């Protein structure tokens, strides 16, 4: 599926490597307390667990893998990637629904500090003694990066798929998409074919239109008996977050936040989300990083799950994780 997020531009081919820490020795930031996160009212996140192999008697449990989805997504988006990692690594793999997505609670606040605080709470309550490997796609990648930088003791390694620690201009497509979905919900009667035609006015790609319709529930109104649509996600909350730059933004500085644990950045060759120009910024926050190119656009986690899993497994093996 073509990128829902942007009309993708090509980026250069070079594979850049960050400065690697000595093998077998991982250094972490000492910044453990974060007063801002402690003040945030968190929500309990919903998750799916794929169980790994039991640890041998006396052995340290392997670090679980926790996967975070992107904007408008849910844990289902990363189901195949989770299955591949679970099978290859033999360890617990969790997929989470972030706030205002999937089955997790709805709340008026939607920004990175709040999402980081939610995930930090979930990790403390659910993953035991072993700090997990955090894997995030797009918006979820910024959540994972923020958590590694703010609470490094909760992260044994970072995998960022298709995002970088930079602030960008909010994508104009998102408000248009959400406006179109709001108009669908306002119609007293609407068939699936009519909904598709209405979305064609704002999006030419049929796969993207199907994805947008998946964010809506087609139901029979008990009062009128007519078929109509209602949103599965809080459209107004997410539209506000997009318009004010809470999704495209980045609030941290390498002067105060730096994660020296192992980090892997995966980027699509037809995407500009991790452009070569952003690699110095990546290195300033994550000096111990690798970056690998994957053939595809922004959705390489779902378009190329096997290759993404191969690269993640190789990365963890090379870092003895």
Image: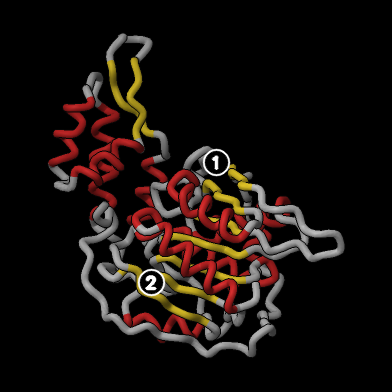
* Scheme of image coloration: secondary structure
* Image coords of residue 274 (percent x, y): 35, 73
Q: Earlier in the sequence, mark 2 or mark 1?
A: 1
Q: Is residue 246 visible?
A: no
Question: For the point 61% across and 88% down, which residue is it?
Answer: 21
Dot 1 lies on which element?
loop
Q: How many numbered discs?
A: 2
Q: Residue furthest right?
A: 58
- 86 in relation to 280, above or below: above
The image shows residue 13 at horizontal and vertical percentages of: 29, 80
Q: Position of residue 246 (x, y in %)?
A: 42, 60
User: For the residue carrying disc 2, how many other residues have a C-alpha within 10 Å: few (<14), some (14-19), or many (20+)?
Assistant: some
Q: Which residue is mark 2?
A: 167
Question: Which quadrant holds residue 260?
Answer: bottom right
Q: Is residue 306 left or right of residue 228?
A: right
Question: Disc number at residue 211?
Answer: none
Q: Is residue 175 left or right of residue 47?
A: left
Q: Is residue 288 left or right of residue 38?
A: left
Observer-side mark, 2 or 1, equals 1
Residue that carries the numbered disc 1 in the rendered image: 104
* Secondary structure state at the residue bearing disc 2: loop
- Give the answer, above or below, for where 18 lies relative to 275: below
Residue 244: image location, x then y, percent: 36, 58
On the picture, is 2 further left or further right than 150? left
Are the two marked residues, 2 and 1, in contact with CB atoms closer than 8 angstroms?
Answer: no
Q: Is residue 85 visible?
A: yes
Q: CA distance from mark 2 to mark 1?
A: 26 Å
């Amino acid at each position: 599926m073509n990128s829902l997020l942007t009309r993708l531009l090509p980026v250069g081919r070079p594979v850049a490597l960050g400065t690697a820490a000595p093998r077998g020795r991982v250094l972490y930031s000492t910044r453990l307390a974060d007063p801002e996160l402690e003040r945030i009212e968190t929500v309990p996140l919903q998750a799916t667990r794929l169980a790994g192999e039991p640890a041998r008697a006396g052995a340290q449990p392997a670090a679980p893998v926790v996967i975070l989805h992107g904007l408008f997504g849910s844990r289902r988006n990363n189901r195949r990637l989770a299955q591949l990692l679970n099978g290859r690594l033999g360890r617990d793999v969790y997929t989470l629904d972030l706030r205002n997505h999937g089955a997790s609670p709805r709340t008026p606040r939607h920004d990175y500090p709040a999402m980081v605080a939610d995930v930090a709470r979930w990790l403390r309550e659910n993953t035991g003694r072993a700090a997990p490997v955090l894997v995030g796609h797009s918006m979820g990648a910024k959540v994972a990066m923020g958590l590694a930088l703010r609470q490094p003791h909760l992260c044994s390694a970072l995998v960022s798929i298709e995002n970088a620690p930079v602030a960008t201009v909010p994508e104009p497509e998102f408000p248009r998409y959400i406006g179109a979905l709001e108009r669908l919900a306002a119609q007293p009667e609407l068939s699936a074919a009519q909904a598709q035609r209405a979305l064609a006015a704002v999006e030419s790609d049929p796969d993207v239109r199907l994805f947008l319709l998946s964010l809506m529930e087609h139901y029979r109104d008990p009062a009128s008996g007519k078929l109509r649509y209602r949103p599965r996600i809080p459209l107004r909350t997410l539209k506000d977050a997009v318009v004010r730059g809470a999704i495209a933004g980045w609030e941290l500085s390498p002067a105060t936040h730096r994660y020296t644990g192992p980090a892997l950045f995966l980027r699509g060759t037809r995407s500009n989300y991790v452009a070569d120009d952003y690699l110095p910024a990546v290195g300033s926050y994550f000096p111990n990083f690798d970056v690998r190119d994957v053939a595809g656009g922004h959705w390489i986690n779902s378009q190329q799950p096997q290759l993404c899993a191969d690269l993640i497994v190789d990365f963890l093996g090379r870092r003895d994780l």
